[in-house]
Amino acid sequence: MEYEIPEAALLAQESMNGVLMGGRNLKVGRPSNMPQAQPIIEMVMQEAKAYHRVYVASVHPDLSESDLKSVFEAFGEVTKCQLARATGPNAGSGHRGFGYLEFSNAQSANEAIAGMNMFDLGGQYLRVGKCIT
């Protein structure tokens, strides 16, 4: 599978590797051309460390950026909250079910990841992970 968002690929890899499906364990990893891309990926990840951002997926369609921000503020100051806007002729004002939050410090971001990953918000379990871009 290919993912549009690197953080989604990382969460899928972490949560699906070794899962039993059809009597066999799934083996989930990076593509075989990974060694060629590794230096670029490491550079991007290093640059991302300067920001205290988290990736949030499986956001209920009825939730807004302000809703999400108010929930995550329990872990510290949220300096930015942005949900990916839906695109296309029928998109309206909705979002695509994922987004990013930026915290004022690393501790708040790490606590948000630990506390909110798989948290039931609006009937959907949030997937929360470290932002790598």
Image: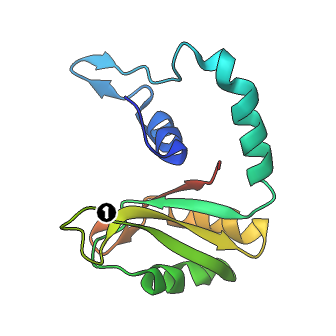
User: Residue at 49% across / 44% down in the picture?
Assistant: 11
**Residue 108 in picture, x, y percent from top left:** 71, 71
Question: Compared with residue 55, is residue 47 higher up or lower down, i.e. above or below?
Answer: above
Front-most of residues 120 and 62 = 62
Q: Where is residue 60 in the image (x, y as percent from the top left)?
A: 31, 70
Q: Which amino acid does label 1 sit on?
A: Thr
Q: What percent of the width, then of the height, locates residue 9?
A: 48, 39
In the rendered view, does 21 fall on the left or right side of 27?
left
Residues 12 and 42: in front is 42
Residue 14 visible in the shown view = yes
Q: In this view, does 75 lie above or below 19?
A: below
Q: Name the residue under label 1.
A: 87
Q: Percent x, y for residue 125?
A: 35, 61
Please tell me how many numbered marks the rendered image carries: 1
| Quarter location, residue 119 | bottom left
When the figure is inspected, residue 1 is found, relative to residue 95, above or below; the finding is: above
Q: What secondary structure is marked by label 1?
A: loop
Q: In which quarter of the image is residue 118?
A: bottom left
Which residue is farthest front? Answer: 89
Q: Decide if residue 128 is on the left or right side of residue 53.
A: left
Residue drawn at point x = 18 percent, y = 67 percent: 90
Q: Is residue 119 above or below residue 69?
A: above
Image quadrant for the N terminus? top left
Residue 114 in view here: no
> Residue at the location (65% across, 70% down)?
102
Instruction: Name the residue: 74% across, 52% down.
Output: 48
Q: Which colour scheme is used?
A: rainbow
Q: In this view, does 127 lie to the left or right of 107?
A: left
